[in-house]
Image (cartoon, helix red, strand yellow):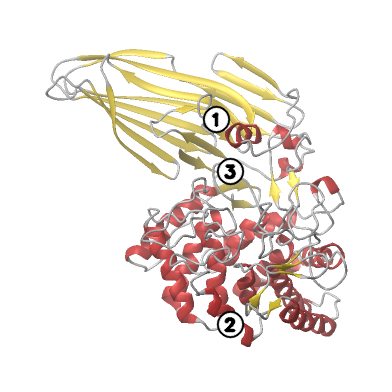
Amino acid sequence: MLIIKNANLMAVFSETGEADGKQRPEEGIYLLDTKVVERLRVSVNSGRKVVQIGKEVKGNKLKFWELSGFDGEGYEMLIEKVFEAFPDGLLVEVEVRNLKSEPVCFLLENVIDYTCTDIFEVRNAVSHGVSFEKGESLQEVFIEGKTMKCVSDFLKIHVRHDFPASVEDTLEGREIRKYRFKIEAEISFPLESGVAQIFHNKPFPRLVLNTSSRGKLRKLLKQSIDDINLLLLSTRFGAVPAAGTPWFSTIFGRDSLVFSLQCLEHFPDLVKNILEIHSFLQAQDIDLSREMEPGKIIHELRTGELNLSGRLPFALYYGTIDATPLYILVMHAYWKFTGDDEFIERHLNNLDSAFRWILEYGDIDRDGYMEYQSKSVLQNQGWKDSGSSVVRKDGSFPRGPIALSEVQAYLYGAMNAMIDFENHFHLGMDAEKLKEDADKLKERFNADFWLDDEEYFALALDGEKRPVDSITSNPAHGLLTGIVDNEKAEKLVKRLFSKDMFSGWGVRTMSSKMKAYNPFSYHNGSIWPHDNSLIIKGLLNYGYVDEAKKLSRALLRAAEYFDYRLPELYSGLEGPRPLPYPVSCSPQLWAAGSAFVIADALEKY
């Protein structure tokens, strides 16, 4: 699978340079969450065998080189095909070069098939991982010649192209000829739709790599900034990054906020855009089907027919426990780094609403901890959101509500951030009482989550406040906000680098001693670069510089085996090289953001 993208348009090709969604459902051209071209094939045929000799993918441009017509001594034609993504379409350029002195005849053929298919329907065809009843389409699709219009109450799509079906041509000896075609595509939403107020089709400046790093680290940073640029979407607030391609090419709350913590010092303007869009999308009402409550920060935004029509709940979906405290953490970090009082003053109501959500909805049983109890879609609502990720040491599953260890760390950081905001902006909160509550949370956390026999923290507390005693990476996020007592921090760090947690390529999501451990599972033994990057930041926060550098070097060595593009996750196995996870998302936002944490740890400390 080869992917190019520019703003809100994405194209997915096969390794051979064509898109055939009928054979390989993920392939095609997408506008946001809707596939608009099912099949695209551009071929040059002289009646002889064509051999691909090379390909190159860079950001929004994909190139293929082919040779045609071997006669025992040499080839007669060199063919270069270039596919370039723009915000409003796809440009295709074909260059045909006659390598011989005699004329050569050939046929240039183009095949384009339109479609209007929600990405969730495509995902279902690929993995059967999304359950829904599609029912009768609410869209009317009109195809006339080279134009398609797709119209419903929820979206309008217009696609057109200027490709001829075929071109017969002759090249004189050594002659070169170029052909240029374009697919143009646009999408709009009804004015009453919230989505209509978010996505634009305006150009935006690309991020620029500004580093003195050399060697392997520079290669990692260069690939990562290319990936971040690839993931940028065009919105009313400017560029905002998507979570990953191909399935998550949209805005995710947790992912973009974690990325903000990773990269604030490198891209503060991008972080500002992220905060703007999450403030705009902050929940105002209660809608249990979307797990929406006033003040909550969004988990996922979708723009396809299945979601906009309500058959799936993800058009505006809020099923996450951690995005709201992370929003407060990022707001505070942005303010401390930029000193932008005016920005914070404009968003004081958003901050107040977010903190009220934590107090009124985030703490289900009013015990001072944040918990979740899924009401609809996602059973687990921390960053490890797979169904089997919250599990005991013996392999059994706890009953909720679930209080995750890392979420209490984010809560502690959010409370201290609100104290800072109160002291500076005078929100009307009782700062002294809030400080007492934060201190009490830290004291209780270090008592309730601590496992004496493991000298480590529990993954979570269950609905009866019993520790979920698996040894995982989650509690290490506590180092990020300072919730861990210094004495316990020393023991936590020691365990992180023990053989059962550290593979040599990173810290595992779960100890290899646990019953549920599987190095090729999604969350129970694999290694996630973003998870490790937050651990690195926490280690630095507590003064464990040598350990932070050790972990950073492990991730940098791992990156070499993935062409310096850190994947979403990889295997937790020890060995001579890190093994890939077969369906890891790549490029992926917070994996790319991890590169900048690695660079900071290795070069600034």
Tell me the residue that label 2 is attached to: 491
Tell me the residue that label 1 is attached to: 25
Mark toward the start of the polypeptide (1 vs 2) = 1
Q: Which residue is drawn at 81% across and 59% down?
A: 295
Look at the numbered disc 1 and give the secondary structure of its residue: loop
Q: Residue at x 66, y 84 (%)?
A: 485
Q: Pick the residue in front: 438 or 228.
A: 438
Rounded to the nearest angstrom, the CA distance separating label 1 from label 3 is 29 Å
Q: Residue 208 location, x and y as percent? A: 45, 58
Tell me the residue that label 3 is attached to: 202
Quarter of the image that includes the N terminus: top left
Q: Is residue 264 visible?
A: no
Q: Residue reaching furthest bottom?
A: 487
Quarter of the image that includes the C terminus: bottom left
Mark toward the start of the polypeptide (3 vs 2) = 3
Rounded to the nearest angstrom, the CA distance separating label 3 from label 2 is 51 Å
Q: In this view, does 539 lie above or below 115?
A: below
Q: Is residue 197 visible?
A: yes
Mark 1 touches mark 3? (CB < 8 Å): no
Q: Pick the residue in front: 482 or 281.
A: 482
Rounded to the nearest angstrom, the CA distance separating label 1 from label 2 is 49 Å
Under mark 1, the amino acid is Pro
Q: Quadrant of residue 590?
A: bottom right
Under mark 2, the amino acid is Lys
Q: Residue 27 location, x and y as percent? A: 51, 32
Look at the numbered disc 3 and give the secondary structure of its residue: loop
